[in-house]
Image (tube, rainbow, N blue to C red):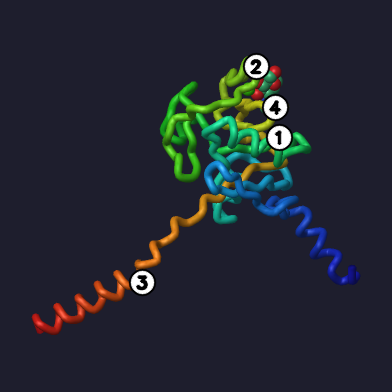
Amino acid sequence: MKAFLAPLAACAALSPAAPAIAAPVTFSGNGHSYELVLSLPVTWDYAKTEAETRGGYLATVTSQEEWDFIVALNSGNMRAWLGGTDSTDYGTTEGNWIWATGPETGQAITFNAWGAGEPNNSGGNEHFLEGWWNPYWNDVPGATMLEAYIVEYAPAVPLPASAPLILAGLGAFGVFHRRRQG
Ligand code: 2F8
Ligand code: CA
């Protein structure tokens, strides 16, 4: 590397938004893509914002198959944030776990992979979902500094092939209608 680029490379490596180790990969079960992002240690809130900045959201897990797929992405067993919470900050109450990210925002968590004895709300302030406890879920304080988070990307719903024709037709009708009235 050229000497003058070294400081820039060092900054990139230290950024909490440091690059993921792998490109997002697609789960055939729902067509969504997933990415394990490694970072300087971050809180749940920070990870949530970072995931959204990337165009995705902290992953929401709704089936064993989806969870198995995510587990396979995290072969290094990193402690990683997921999108679940039972915090009153997100409109729920202790013990009532919901997804607070992505299309399932506000929905109760139905599938789960809690570790033995979890969630235990240890210390009375564990309201955020850590997706790694070898390889089960654990509740931890949102201020816990974790070095990874899982981003899920839902593809945009494609417009039907006829959409441009329909839009053009509506536009033409609008012009015609205005002319008749004017
Ligand atoms: O023994 C399980 C327990 O271990 C830790 O608390 C001592 C975890 N706390 C953090 O990781 C911050 C608990 O969440 C976990 O339940
Ligand atoms: Ca816990």
Please give the label number shown on residue 133. 4
Q: Quadrant of residue 159?
A: bottom left
Point out the image quarter for the C terminus. bottom left
What is the x, y in percent for residue 62? 52, 34
The image quadrant that residue 147 belongs to is: top right
Q: Quarter for ligand 1?
A: top right
Give the crowd class for mark 4: few <14, some 14-19, many >=20 residues within 10 Å. Answer: some
The circle on residue 116 is: 2
Indicate if the residue with disc 4 has its beta carbon within 8 Å of ligand 1: yes
What amino acid does circle 2 point to? Ala
| Residue drawn at point x = 52 percent, y = 32 percent | 85
Q: Would residue 9 appear left or right of 36 to someone viewing this image?
A: right
Closer to the camera in the image, 151 or 129: 151
- Which residue position is annotated with label 3? 164
Left/right placement of residue 150 relative to residue 62 reads right
User: Among all residues in the image, which is located at the extreme front?
Assistant: 161
SS category of the residue bearing label 2: loop
Q: Is mark 1 within 8 Å of ligand 1?
A: yes
